[in-house]
Image: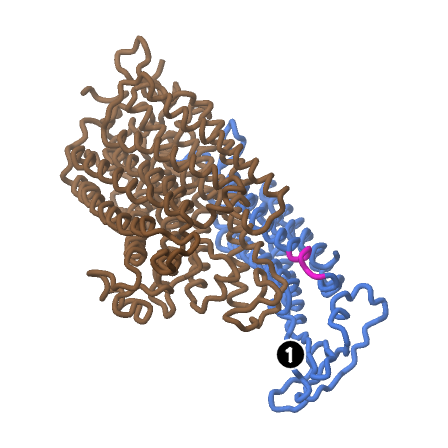
Chain colours: A blue, B brown
Amino acid sequence: MDIPYVVQPREDTGLYNAKVGIWLFLASEVMLFGALFSSYILLRVGAPAGYWPRGWLNVPVGTVNTLVLITSSITTVMAWAACKMNQFGRFKIFHACTLLLALTFVSIKSYEYHDKFTHYEIGLKDGRIADGHIVENHPQADHVVIAGRYVQDRRDLYDLEVRKAPHHHEEISIPRAQIESMERYGPWHNTYLAIYFTLTGLHALHVIGGAIVIGFLWGPGSKLWETDPERFTNRIEISGLFWHFVDLVWIFLFPVLYLI
Amino acid sequence: MQAAAPAIPPTGLHEARHEEAGFWSTYVFSTDHKVIGIQYGITALCFLFLGFCLMMLMRWQIAHPGQPVPAFGPLLAAIFGDMAAKGIVSPDLYNSFGAMHGTIMVFLAIVPLAFAAFGNYVVPLQIGAPDMAFPSVNMASYQAYVVGGVIMFFSFFIPGGPAQAGWTSYSPLATSIPTDGQTFWIIGMVFLITSSLLGAVNFIATIIQLRAPGMTWMRLPFFVWAQFVTAFLLLLAFPPLEAAAIMQFMDKVAHTSFFLPTGLAVGGTLAHVSGGGSPLLWQHLFWFLAHPEVYVLILPAMGIVAEIIANNTRKPIWGYKSLVYSVLTLGFFSFIVWAHHMYLTGMGVKIATFFQTTTMIISIPSVIVLTCMFISLWGGSIRFNTPMLFVMAFLPMFGIGGLTGLPLGLSYSDIHLHDTYYVIAHFHYIVAPGTIFALFAGVYYWFPKITGRMMSEFWGRVHFWLSLVFMNLIFQPMFAQGMAGMLRRMADGGANYSQARVEGAVGGLSPGIMNLHTYILWAAVGLALAQIPFMVNLFWSIRHGRPAASDNPWEATTLEWQTPTPPPHGNFASPPVVYRGPYEYSVPGHARDFTPQNEPG
């Protein structure tokens, strides 16, 4: 006896096996990201007044990345539709676009990560705080140079949206002897960055994982088209559903982390 | 005994197709649900044994704090070095054993045994399917489980030893203890969660898609329903723990502060963390998994019990539909009771009221299930074979475990009982003489289908009666200890709070309560000895047991008994068709007192 409904849908459920499987898997993914979003809410609600960062992320860059992912969702559907219409060449083109867009998304995300990892908050012995991107930081040199600004109150660093005045980002040279503490904007810096890196990192892993699957189906996996086109089309549909979900997560992540 | 059911002629199909399969692809990298079920079963039994050994060491330490463990002391000293100097279990090592006993028993022993092993072997057979819907995913699930288990096991041998913060791994305690064991624990858990996710998707898809023609939802054996709901619990409750594990991993490795509050001091000095995190967040995420997990532990056991009761009372299970709706209700409500583990965290009265209410509501379907099982016995001519004996013991044991949970579900009484041995006794009554008894019953019941031989009835009875007596001798005294105020997780078993140490201390633990430790230790030794007949019986009967009289030695109605023994790859020689409900025993007017589901007419 062979396993039934691998390719053809079962009559009473109207689904083939893998489609049931992927929807169940996505349900568990909803719970995974749901728990992290809930954690975000709890951490934000629990933060002392004035200490939840706003405007720390670059909205135009995030918007571009959102558009990149949405476009990749469209090309995914087009690739699946091409399979359904028996146009294998079109499928190849559309899914090549999906892969390029996935790569673009990850590159832009890496740029944003890099931006945070070169951003330092430097506590000085006179109580002031210097904050900005590192320009020069040789361990031997007795000065650290950043492009940034001084603040008196740490809270001034947190809400960048109410400060309507443009940022004064000038090069500041700080004698090393004056520095009391120096910390980059990594996940350890505060709970906002912790949840930012965790959520976007987990999401990026999903993008990379999805891209690997789509890449496989685009490359070596596409041989299945010659022997069992229907099953291959099903695989494109399944991986596409996952890709839409990854896209959907970002649609939630973007406003939550960048806008509000 | 006449041949059971429409005789299925032996077929050369199986041999013809799988001739060239070698040892590795047949037994190690198999995609056959039955082999995977057996793999899960054997691995889980090994972990059950390991968890049991940890418990024995802890019971020794509790009864005789600071004294070297007899016989095994030098071995402990060799493995753990300073943590077990001279063979004495140090408090740190005790904490490790406690944490790992819980983790191993829940995530590596009982759930894999109840859900993955029995589910894998029995569910596709019972619904008339040739295999699981995704055989390769099934294999991957087992492999992820093995990797998780190996990581957990390996953590015993790293410097500092395994995780020490209890199976609940509360932050900030879990991340503050200077051992990498917690990191191993987290990574191991991620693999185990992945394993159960793959398993759960597979089970649900299989039950939805691969039911044989005629196997409608209300003709499913109750065991399948129980596994179906269990799979949903695993599917939806585990991911939040995975999220929590990821965050705790970040706390441990990337020094974030998800669960670390502002001003956290460790060992008297201010911890070098940003703070701003919430320790309560961990508890919420953990219990959001861990309460449904309780039902993951018990639902498959209820399923096994229903099968065996119907089979051995020779009449339909009473209230099949009530059972199905109860188990669905249990599944749903198990998601909204988690905070009853957290009454002492200072939650508001209104929230406590909500969770008390849902907790009382969830006891209703549990009672319905138990009541249906009891009524099923009424008027039956009961066959008291070994599986049935274990099932008969399951009913009152689960009853005790369940009813003693009610005072814990009410915040007022929970304040007194929280974190005491009363809690230990309560949930062990559910899991040990409850679930594990049902699992034993399942082993004795399905053994002839797996091997074609029966396990010894006599040694089965010896195993049963001794286990029943010793289980109760172990856990019954703990209720008394807990109500007297003995806290759990104390490496000295409460000696520090005994009246012997501080004479006349108010609330000090009396000598009578303290002495119970010794009785419990010896009862645990007795329980260990009582398992020897089982282990010998299990392995001896594989080759030397009495051959089963037919493919259906218990004269059962469900489909797994209507296959060749053992079922070949692909299970059924010809696709089965289902004509009737799962428990048509003693139907008036029929020649035999059982009518298999695939018998036409």
**Secondary structure under the numbered disc 1 in the rendered image:** strand
Q: Quadrant of the C terminus of chain A?
A: bottom right
Image coordinates for residue A252, horizontal then vertical, percent: 68, 51
Image coordinates for residue A88, horizontal then vertical, percent: 57, 47
Image coordinates for residue B533, horizontal then vertical, percent: 18, 42
**Front position in the image: B443 or B100:** B100
The image shows residue A257, relative to residue A238, as above or below, that is below
Please give the residue where the numbered disc 1 appears in the rendered image: A182
The image shows residue B75, relative to residue A84, as above or below, that is below
Residue type for callout 1 = Met
Residue visible at 22% across and 27% down in the picture? B553
The image shows residue B386, relative to residue B341, as above or below, that is above
Observer able to see residue B46: no
Instruction: Identify the chain of the residue marked 1, using the numbered disc in the image.
Output: A
Queried whether the magenta region covers residue B543, the answer comes back as no
**Is B47 left or right of B231, judged from the image as shown?**
left
Residue visible at 39% across and 19% down in the picture? B580
Observer able to see residue A11: yes
- Farthest right residue in view: A165
Image coordinates for residue A18, horizontal then vertical, percent: 49, 41
Magenta range is A43-48
Our reading of the magenta stretch's main secondary structure is helix
Residue visible at 29% across and 11% down in the picture? B590
